Amino acid sequence: MQLYRTGMVQKELDPTCTTHCQRSVAEAYTFDVQYFRTHCSLKPLFPTKKETQMTTYKLIYFDTRGLAETARYMFALAGVEYEDHRIKNEEWPQVKKDYPLGVLPVLEVDGEQIPQSSAINHFLASEFGLLGSSNLETAKINVVYEVLVDSLNEAMKVDFADPKIKEQLKTKFYDDILETHSKFLVEILEKNNGGNGFFVGDKITLADISFLAVRRDMLAYIDKDDRLHRHPKLQALADRIAAVPQIAEWIKNRPPV
Amino acid sequence: MQLYRTGMVQKELDPTCTTHCQRSVAEAYTFDVQYFRTHCSLKPLFPTKKETQMTTYKLIYFDTRGLAETARYMFALAGVEYEDHRIKNEEWPQVKKDYPLGVLPVLEVDGEQIPQSSAINHFLASEFGLLGSSNLETAKINVVYEVLVDSLNEAMKVDFADPKIKEQLKTKFYDDILETHSKFLVEILEKNNGGNGFFVGDKITLADISFLAVRRDMLAYIDKDDRLHRHPKLQALADRIAAVPQIAEWIKNRPPV
C-alpha cells in the first residue's frame, strides 16, 4: 500500500484510478483535495478538519435553466452535491436585497456569496478540473466561452427589441451573427482531432459544457430550431456532450424548465 | 549553492529574492518559468529549448486605449516585452479579414491568435501571476472584473443611444447603474485591509488593473468627471495603482490616446 500526499492530506494510492492517483508525487502537489474527492474513490487516510467538513455549495437562480445551467451541468459531471435553490418570480422582490447587486445567479461556497455567472462558471470549472492543462489551453477555452457570451448578448437584444422590428432582428441574428459565430466555433473544433472530440484538448472542458448550455438550452427559447443542423460538427458535439452519462442523467431528471 | 527545480527548468536559488526562490521545493512545483523570469533575477541553469526561445507577444488593437489598456498595464507591470501593434481606422477594412471574427483586440502568442479581450486579460493575468493564489481568490477577482465589464456594456448603450435620449440615459448611467456598481466595489475593497490595499489578497491583481483601465481610462470618454470622487476609497485605489512605478512609467510615456 502506497501513501500519497496531495499537499493537504495523505491518501492511499487508489488502484482503480489510472489518471490521477498513479501520477508522481511531484505532480500530486498540484492537486487539491476537492479534485481527488471528485475523481477518485479514495477517502483520506488522515483526514484534516477541512477534509471532514465537506465544502457546501448552494446555487441560487430563478426556476429556469438560463444563466445557471452551465454550472448545473458541471456539478452533474463532477458528481458533486449542491443545493439547486430556485426562486419563484413572485418571491424575488422580497429576497432581491439578500443578493449582491440584486442579481442572480449567485453561488454560495461555504456561505460565501459569488455573484456573476462568468465568475461562478470559471470557479466551478477550476474546482472540477474543466479549464484545461495550461494557460494557453485555458485561453482557448475562454475564447469559446466569450464567443458564446457574445451570442447570448446579441440574442438578448433580439428578445428585448420593439415587437415591430423583432422578426427582422431575429433573422439577422440567425443568418448573420450566429452564422459568423458558428463558423468560428467549427474552425476551432476542427483544428482539434478533426472536430470529432472536444473544443480544446482531449477531454471535456468548460468550453463544451457552456456550448451545450448556451446553444442548445438558452438559444432554443428564441427559436425552436437551434440552427445547429447547418453545422453537422457542432450538432454532433452537442449530441456527444449531452450523451456523457452524468450529463444525460441530469438532462433526463432535471426540472422541465 | 542550491539547485531549484520549477517543474520545467533547473535554477540556482536566488539570494536576492525573498518571496519566490526561498520557498520549499514542494511549493516550487506550482511555479512556472514565466513567473520566475518575471519576478526573480536568475537565469536558468540548464535552459531548455523553450527557455532559450523567449515567448513573443504581439497585442493588436486600434490606436486607442479601450479594450486593450488592461493588457498593456499588465505587460508594463510584469516588465515583459511585447509589440503594441496599433491599427489606424483607415487601415482596418483591408486587414479585418486577418483576425478571428474580424474583431480586435487580438493577442498573438508565438504567432497563435487569441481574440476576445476577457480571454486575453485572463491569459496574461495567469502568465504574470495576477489571478490570486487560490480558486476562491480568482473567483473574487473575476467578480470585480465582471462588474467592470457590466459597467462598460451599460456605458456602450449610452454611447450608441439616440441623441434625443442620450443625456437622459447618461444621467441614469452615472446616478443609478454606476453608483450601484461603485457601492458594491467599495464593499469588496473595504472587506480587505479596510479598503486601503487591493480588491483581493495582499498584492495587485487583475481586479485592480482592470478597475484602473475601465473606470479611469475608458469611462472618462463619456464624462470627463469619472465620478470616482464620490467614493474616496475607490479614488484612492485608482491613485495607488496608477502610482505603482511600472504603471506610472507606462502612463507617463504611453501614446496620448
Image: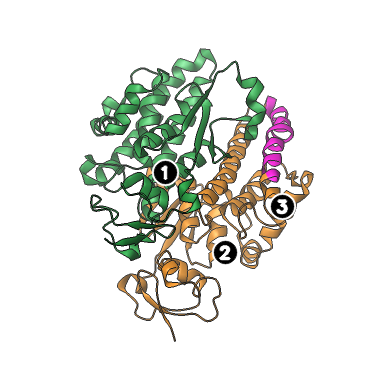
Chain colours: A orange, B green
Residue appearing at x 39%, y 50% in the figure: B138
Pointer 3: what residue? A195
Density class for disc 2 (Cα within 10 Å; few <14, some 14-19, many ≥20) is many
Residue A231 occupies quadrant: top right
Circle number at residue A77: 2
Question: Which chain is mark 3 on?
Answer: A
Q: Are marks 2 and 1 on the same chain?
A: no
Give amino acid for label 1.
Ala
Taking the image as shown, residue A245 lies to the left or right of residue A43, namely: right
x and y, in percent, of residue B46 in the image: 41, 56
**Can residue B225 be seen?**
yes
Give amino acid for label 2.
Leu
x and y, in percent, of residue A117 in the image: 49, 47
Pointer 1: what residue? B125
Please state the extent of the stretch shown in magenta in the rendering. Answer: A164-187
Residue B131 lies, with reference to residue A5, above or below; the image says: above
**Disc 2 secondary structure class:** helix
Question: Which chain is mark 2 on?
Answer: A
Residue appearing at x 60%, y 45% in the figure: A144
